[in-house]
Image (tube, coloured by chain):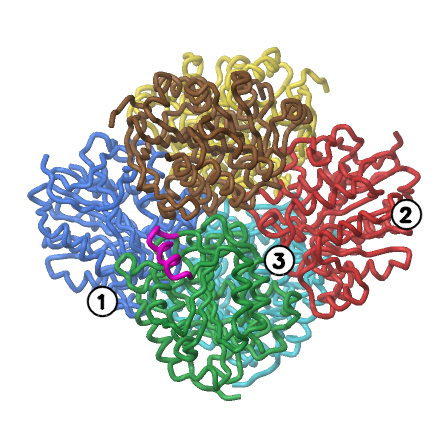
Chain colours: A blue, B cyan, C yellow, D red, E green, F brown
Amino acid sequence: MDKIKDLNDQESSRPFIGTTYSEAIFKNATHLVGFCFDGTTSYRPGARFGPDAIKDASFGLETYSPYLDRDIEDYNIIDTGNLPIYPSKWKITNDYFHANTKELDLKKDKIKFLVMGGEHSISYGPMRLALDNYEDMVLLHFDAHTDLRDGYLEEKYSHASIMRRMWDHMSDKNELIQYGVRSGTKEEFEFMKKHNTLYTSLDSLCDKIASIDAKRPIYMTLDLDFFDPAFMPGTGTPEAGGENFHSFIRIIKILKEKNFIGADIVELAPMIDSTGNSNAFASKIVRETLLAMQD
Amino acid sequence: MDKIKDLNDQESSRPFIGTTYSEAIFKNATHLVGFCFDGTTSYRPGARFGPDAIKDASFGLETYSPYLDRDIEDYNIIDTGNLPIYPSKWKITNDYFHANTKELDLKKDKIKFLVMGGEHSISYGPMRLALDNYEDMVLLHFDAHTDLRDGYLEEKYSHASIMRRMWDHMSDKNELIQYGVRSGTKEEFEFMKKHNTLYTSLDSLCDKIASIDAKRPIYMTLDLDFFDPAFMPGTGTPEAGGENFHSFIRIIKILKEKNFIGADIVELAPMIDSTGNSNAFASKIVRETLLAMQD
Amino acid sequence: MDKIKDLNDQESSRPFIGTTYSEAIFKNATHLVGFCFDGTTSYRPGARFGPDAIKDASFGLETYSPYLDRDIEDYNIIDTGNLPIYPSKWKITNDYFHANTKELDLKKDKIKFLVMGGEHSISYGPMRLALDNYEDMVLLHFDAHTDLRDGYLEEKYSHASIMRRMWDHMSDKNELIQYGVRSGTKEEFEFMKKHNTLYTSLDSLCDKIASIDAKRPIYMTLDLDFFDPAFMPGTGTPEAGGENFHSFIRIIKILKEKNFIGADIVELAPMIDSTGNSNAFASKIVRETLLAMQD
Amino acid sequence: MDKIKDLNDQESSRPFIGTTYSEAIFKNATHLVGFCFDGTTSYRPGARFGPDAIKDASFGLETYSPYLDRDIEDYNIIDTGNLPIYPSKWKITNDYFHANTKELDLKKDKIKFLVMGGEHSISYGPMRLALDNYEDMVLLHFDAHTDLRDGYLEEKYSHASIMRRMWDHMSDKNELIQYGVRSGTKEEFEFMKKHNTLYTSLDSLCDKIASIDAKRPIYMTLDLDFFDPAFMPGTGTPEAGGENFHSFIRIIKILKEKNFIGADIVELAPMIDSTGNSNAFASKIVRETLLAMQD
Amino acid sequence: MDKIKDLNDQESSRPFIGTTYSEAIFKNATHLVGFCFDGTTSYRPGARFGPDAIKDASFGLETYSPYLDRDIEDYNIIDTGNLPIYPSKWKITNDYFHANTKELDLKKDKIKFLVMGGEHSISYGPMRLALDNYEDMVLLHFDAHTDLRDGYLEEKYSHASIMRRMWDHMSDKNELIQYGVRSGTKEEFEFMKKHNTLYTSLDSLCDKIASIDAKRPIYMTLDLDFFDPAFMPGTGTPEAGGENFHSFIRIIKILKEKNFIGADIVELAPMIDSTGNSNAFASKIVRETLLAMQD
Amino acid sequence: MDKIKDLNDQESSRPFIGTTYSEAIFKNATHLVGFCFDGTTSYRPGARFGPDAIKDASFGLETYSPYLDRDIEDYNIIDTGNLPIYPSKWKITNDYFHANTKELDLKKDKIKFLVMGGEHSISYGPMRLALDNYEDMVLLHFDAHTDLRDGYLEEKYSHASIMRRMWDHMSDKNELIQYGVRSGTKEEFEFMKKHNTLYTSLDSLCDKIASIDAKRPIYMTLDLDFFDPAFMPGTGTPEAGGENFHSFIRIIKILKEKNFIGADIVELAPMIDSTGNSNAFASKIVRETLLAMQD
């Protein structure tokens, strides 16, 4: 195995259950990274505590998934810890991610990534990294919110505009597939309608993903408010009428058969849910996603 | 526009998002009123804090509804603040509501009302106001509980008897349609059976509402414990086995096409749910209801 | 009526709504027993407070069930209080239960039991009692977890191994039916597959139970984490993707028509859910189970 | 021992630790009564749950007090359960208390009372009972608030006016001693100044109580918001700058040497404090008060 | 009275009890301003919700202070609402404050300010405003933390460095008085020692303040974690060993006799304390501060 | 430096701030050990989560103590992680501790220990280890409870009897000093009186400790319920009337000048206090204790 580069300069923390802790990025491995930034959050902050909460709660989980019949311990998954964070500095934190990953060759080195947020604006780096390595990438966006504003509260790279920022980088070679979206301005909904990006039934979504060529790279950005607040109470901007765990499992079983090359999972805000159940929920979503990515 | 009468004598508060604050009642408008009474609550009190919690949480909502494709800001909706309340005095608070609304001509002046509780006993005033103005009104009652007791704990106008009180005022010209009810005494369930008021499947309910003449006035009294406690944890008497947001959206889309003249939404008890998610849920229900009422 | 034996040596507590309090075991009656042990819990403890929380929350319930059209007050149901508990001593507490019940003749004396936990390891005593009295018993196991480990953390009778312990006692005359299970090691899932004990759809489960001979005794052990954490947040090891109340009602309606001779309901951990809604949920499950057991 | 009269018509509940449960009032005994009314509460309700919370939490207490070197189990203390309550009906509940106690002869029958609220308005009945039996009674009022309004929100017998109501019944033979008061209108503070009822240092208060003739009857009405919210978070109207437990112990040690004939302890609102520590605190205050009353 | 300038462009909100709401700044008045920024918070965020929580909780307070024998309603105090906020943009929000206040002449126009945070970095604007108007100002700094770092996590104007920033602007004409400080690096404590700014006993502090010339302008910046977490649990960085309410009252009574020209009160984080008591505490501190400022 | 022996077989976790993580025990170092057992807890469990909560909360602390003018980073302090735990097996866990430490020569190898609980019964191992190495040791016991029962609920080594167990091992060469104790049976208080172990004022305690010969070894066992629940809400058996942080600092400053050779700090139950402030409090106590132990 070949160590490439240091991503992390934080104190070591307890790794996700079944994974190995290392500060370095290795070839032939899936990397789990914590990105604890929530500086542009406009409503209830605290997503910065998401990654540690997910890792802590993972100790109440088994490493085996009966849904995918796979076990974390059977794969080479590395917990690279949390990135260094500067609370009010989106640019510095994002540049850091870029500087430390820009020379990676994900395809050749067989590296996959799962980045845990943090708020949705942190997805920009990982999504760009994926797009830079896979120019024909399909982008799955699961979220309660459109996130298609063209900037928000004087911040161009806001959690509320991050999908618009990605859209700017995408071309005809890519495809954006949105599902779960149930909140936005009228203009944002018109944007989705115009570009045909929004799927409004689970059946049509699953058919669509199933139809993607098995070799075509797929990246998933998952804002946990995609799920109904009943199942994921611990998120900053709860939006009634969301999806449940079974919908996710139906999707992830399809992704298991595809070329699933990377993902980010964002917007767990642990302080909001004193039961700790949101942490356990997110932790299980992370486990399933890590397992679905494996070849 | 024509100002009719002062309803409110409280300090001004932050209005529901997208609405205009005014203490007066205007013609050609929908009025949103807070009624902070919970004095007859027999189990867990606190619904008195419902209206302010709904208004506060509305700032995490968009004004646009993708379900109804309507925007709060496109309509004349007035937040008239909260009514003055005397904690242990149902009669005084209810008489106040009556005295200040009895001369309104809802039909002629094109006035609609959405009253936010408070406990379910507060619905008496708004339901009577609607009935006095629309003698052929259909009354929709969505609730976990029958509320058909003939008085409760020495209080004739209790939260547990309020539908029985309304029944006393209704005639052959009216219709009572109940849905979601899953708790009551054997006698109460027999009352519903005898009078054929209870619908037990969403399909049959929706068919029934769809069949109502488009001009016939419809009023909705919604006790938020109609919803499963998973979705609405913050209510005084949680009752497992309730409805979800999707059921409500299916109903409200039908009401949008009807002569939906008024409503009340009651029994949010914010102190019970420390996540604040119940407030956000109720707030979204209020938004959809306000929008469905518009012509 | 005939008093047989003292089971309880605790201070009297408020009985479950609609039941009668007595420390003795009577013939021709259903007994509700609290078993407040959680000493082998490996993750979040607190199930010891389950029985009292269920009894307290029952005062927010009606005694009448519209699902089963039966009323607690119409039957002879006795709340025998809580068993004496020694926090770290599984054997002492279990021996106590055994010593006080081993001479009962459940069939002849028409005695039924519903034991409230406590953690799942407390089910051992009641399950053994049922098996000793009914050699052809069918065992229903509803749970998120397999509980089929062969010992756990140096404890043979752990919450995580209790179904394996029962399996050791069962013979060809018995049948184990598992449903809701979604967490375990690969080996545990293979065990279930090998022995064909796991049902994976509600339809197939209901068909199976419906097919059981009406005279054959059925016992149900219900770990409340069977339900999705959205509906039952207050449990030690929440596991996403669980069942809802409607599934349970569908099952219990079938059991009402069978020879349903006993049950235990475990793993409510009240401290975890500050809304108190989990207590109300569990309380309703207890009411329905007590009513379904009646002849 | 001689049973006099039934006060209670509620379901039996778990008695305070070390006491005996009985629905009747006996001679030569101290009675602990729950009065679960909070109907006039103007801010945060929930004091109705106080008595049960105090009794439940008492199981985390020892029956022995090292402060007073006395043990609950060494005295004849009877838990008479909770009074029947009608949520919005102050008069009915208060009349009930009066009707069931008016023929008692506290002095002759050697009966003492400790009534647990509920909100402060419930103290009216017990204070009147004491005054009717002891015409030269000294009234100790420990509270954060003056409670001297002449009626509040259309309710003459409000929690905010209850001391004014008692003042109306008192004569030159009585004395009102107030301590801990730190909130009220300017008029209320002027009332106290005019009548010299307020003590502003613990030293002067203790000197005053110590100077009371050992035979003169003393009654204490204790609103738990007397204590700083740091020590008693679970109360409806928290007021910074309150007393601590040590102040109370200093006072109660003096009362132990006096003719301490009755008391009420009100305004514990358990739902507000999810730690449960307020319940434990109130429970200890009840233990000390019961013990100080003993001869 | 003379309206000078609009400071606020937010939706109207419920004003602090006893004050008048206006978006403009008037002469001869004290202004209460909400500054909802917490973008540089390095540990637990949420101080952005402080101002609204303080205003909401003020409705549980009397307008009269028995400590200062003054009543809010007797003075001209204006609630100018909350400033517009951009979550991750310290500079924009601070520049906005500066731009809208730089032309004020506080002395001549008899304007005083109380700004509610928000995190401690928001104090920069108000402190600068005070210093620009009063060149001989004494700066009182009450806090658990030194806040004397020379920048923190790439942010020069961080909550952790804000007192250092002010120090840079201060001259021999000013004086910095720090009290309550109990956390910092060794270097920060040495800085305080070198410059003799830290007072370590309440007596010496009170003597010092009492000795200030009655005409010399005094500004107070109060980080609420100055108080012990027992009294103020709802703050981001709790630090044991803090002050209580009585210490504050002793100080504020001295300030009442001085030329107390402005203040800010920061770091209430309401989401952390589900009892709501921290909000009530902060609200009372605001009332006392407003009253002490009056002439 | 010389590595002696493995104590820990758990997954690595985030070390206490300023310390170094290692699974081994080194000479010339202070070791911080987590002992996550709470199996004999009779009331509210959850102390098992104490060590991780203390380590997590330490990241909100500075490494420098202004009270002792020492910095964690200036000393050789090693976080050896958490011991392996078997939930219901006191003997196994305690034997493990003993087996792995019995051959240490604390004096010669200059090893000190701070063990974090867990419930108070875990202190047995560390106290024995200290006594075995220092036969003239003074034992400081700071606690709300006597813990002098001779066994409890069938468990000889219960949290409620652990000081009695130690007493059995102590001889005339040792001394037991108890402070803060305010709850127990009459017999336990008589035991303390008979053996003169209880100090009832801080002054007399401090005088006593100050009088101990500077070379005589001192061990401290600190049950965090020693502190008032206002300051440490997150503990299983809260007992009003406790000490505050300032008392502790006064004691620890004296210990700094003594031969302070070891300590344990137990009974933090993080689930009880949703503010997280108890964790921060305990973390600061650990920091001060570690620093006071250094030479």
Q: Which residue is mark 1?
A: A194
Mark 2 touching mark 1, by CB under 8 A? Answer: no
Q: Amino acid at mark 3?
A: Glu
Asked if the stretch drawn in magenta spans residue E194, the answer is yes
Question: How far apart are labels 3 and 1 at the CA level?
Answer: 57 Å
**What SS does tag 2 mark?**
helix
Assign a secondary structure to mark 1. Answer: helix
Q: Which residue is mark 2?
A: D133
Residue at screen point 51% across, 83% down:
E110
Asked whether, in this view, residue C285 is left or right of residue B252, the answer is right
Residue F253's place in the image compared with E24, above or below, is above
Q: Main secondary structure of the magenta part?
A: helix
Q: CA distance from mark 2 to mark 3?
A: 34 Å
Measured as percent of width and height from the top left, residue F78 is found at: 31, 33
| Residue drawn at 77 percent across, 66 percent down | D193
Q: Which mark is residue E78?
A: none
Residue position for label 3: D239
User: Would you identify the image quadrant in which residue C157 lies?
Assistant: top left
Asked if the magenta segment contains residue B208, the reply would be: no
Q: Position of residue A82 (x, y in %)?
A: 26, 46
In the image, which residues are magenta? E184-196
